[in-house]
Image (cartoon, rainbow, N blue to C red):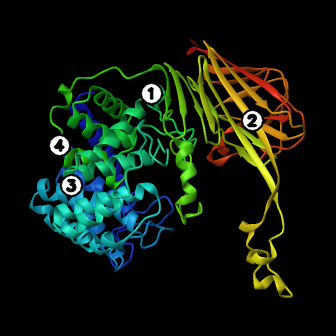
Amino acid sequence: MNSESVFEKLVRMNDEEAREALRREVNEPGNRNDGGIVGPYGIPTASHGGTAGSMATMAAAFVAEGSAFYRDDLLLSALDRAADFMLRRQHEDGTISLGGTNFNSPPDTGFVVSGMAQIYRVLSEQGGEGASAVAAKTKLFLERTIPAMLTGGGHTPNHRWVLVSALTWLHGIFGMEELVHRADEWLAEGLDCTEDGEWTERSNGIYNTVSDIMLIYAAGGLNRPELLEPVRRNLEMMTYMIHEGGEVITDYSGRQDLGRRQNLSEYFLCYRLMAHRDRNPIFASMYDLCAGTLSRLGPVNNHALLGWLAFPCEGMDALERAPLPDRFRKTLNAGYPIREKLAKMADAGHHGKISHSRMHTAFGSPIMRWRDGGTGAAAMTRSESFFSLRHGDARLSGISLTTLFAPGTVEMEDFEETPAGCRMGTTLEKGYYGPVAAEHLPSSAKEEISPWYLLPHHLRPYTHAQKHRIDVEIERDGAEWVLRLRSDRRPDVVTQAVLYFGQNSELTGEELEWTDEGAFFWKGGTLVCMAGDSGFELTAGGGFAHRLPPGSGQGTQGFARRAVVNLLTPFDHEIRIRLLGSSSV
């Protein structure tokens, strides 16, 4: 697609969203929701994906030549009411609330700031005299956020860069050096991206783009080009983290996109800006793929058309393009010293506890990716599932192991490349805890009632530690995959292998038994999974060594169709997967 056709697509999509925003806008003067855009839950919010996001759509429609709403008075009036709504919903401390949760939230305000600043820029520079009143209200909203941005914190790793971006935009408009100082306080924590381009949250479907776009804004606004280095690495990594057609790999995410189908829509602006800046042929090709598969314009902070207007990129069509990798075997994070880093966590002082967030200790874990055109696979460490496979429309979203040894999902920690694939494994440990020594007992132990929670459990002696080893070997042989699951010799450990297939899959097999828990037992024989004209034939992988019923599904993979294999240690179990259908190699 050339720039003209991409722009036409953006305008067409944006006009559709503008019509929907006008339809859903509350038009009841005197009502606290007047001007708000009603969201999926039936109420308007001031969030980056709520009314602020609709303001991005309306502002872009008003400014974009070729839009059905170009310089439209009705749209401008609706945009003005939306701006009033945002000012009313802004709390006295300058923050907004996400809606339903995250009340008086600096990071959610930061998301909105990075988008509202673009609305202010576009309306001021391209909106004409008619848009000046809305631009002034937008500027007032931004000015009111300054105290919160100067003092506020966040929850998650990416929130730091959201706040840095917001501080950068505010500095560009209002010129207060305190804003840069606060941004530097966040940046002093260091950037959390591996050499191979993985961010802490491992969220290829959502939060990669948050960190990327926010640091792109900050690098430009603060004149800190070094902030773009992790962005480049992540955008390079993503060329290996897509299926044919641009669907993103989410099989090992540390956030809510785990196992969800996502495309490259929110990467559009990232690749456009970085391809233009770096004259990078691979980034230019990824930009083309994003444009061709774009299905969402994005929230206010990463809105495709608003960003197009706020950051003109002349000469995109003239950039050199390079073929994207579509046949490879690649290991990511093989050189990251994850064990050494995790060993240092004991000295960090937080004792592994963090409020309203996660430690994300899987950060930097090795991932092996294969791709051969329409067929792709991943071997994953420190993840709920250790293997996933895609072949045409057929999806094996993951295979996980659960055990009653230390009840829960088994995450592979060790990783080693082999000539035909990789070998992974982990050693589980579970022990017991003796009585607290007399000198460590609290006074409550001598009272008539001694609450369990007042005892110093961390001082109990550890006894009878037991270990259990599980290994997985994955090999590819042309159109066939071989998975070998092995335990140590300890007997009678109840184990389950759970295979997660896409909801569009049709599962057949002579020894499949439907259960009341919404899964199949795969007791033996051949299992065939078909989706359209593509599929898998699984042989030698069934088993029913015990009668433990299936669990409810792991994480957000719970929506998949599950086939459960019941194993009992010691086991040396093999699953063979043969590719079926038009995409077979």
Identify the mark nearer the N-term, 1 or 2.
1
- Residue highlighted by disc 1: 245
Question: What whole-number distance in Å separates the C-alpha atoms at marks 1 and 4?
Answer: 27 Å
User: Dot 2 surroundings within 10 Å: few (below 14), some, or many (20 or more)?
Assistant: many
Q: Which mark is residue 470?
A: 2
Task: Identify whether 514 is placed above or below 171.
Answer: above
Identity, as a three-letter code, of the amino acid under mark 2: Ile
Q: Could you say where residue 285 lies in the image, as x and y percent from the top left?
A: 31, 27
Q: Nearer the viewer, mark 1 or mark 2?
A: 2
Give the percent coordinates (x, y) of residue 477: 63, 13
Image coordinates of residue 211 in percent, x first then y, are 38, 49
Kindly indicate the quadrant of the structure image that contains residue 461: bottom right
Amino acid found under the numbered disc labelled 4? Pro
Q: Is 197 or 334 nearer to us in this picture?
A: 334
Q: Quadrant of the N terminus?
A: top left
Please report contact status of discs 1 and 4: CB closer than 8 Å, yes or no: no
Q: Earlier in the sequence, mark 1 or mark 4?
A: 1
Q: Which residue is mark 3?
A: 222
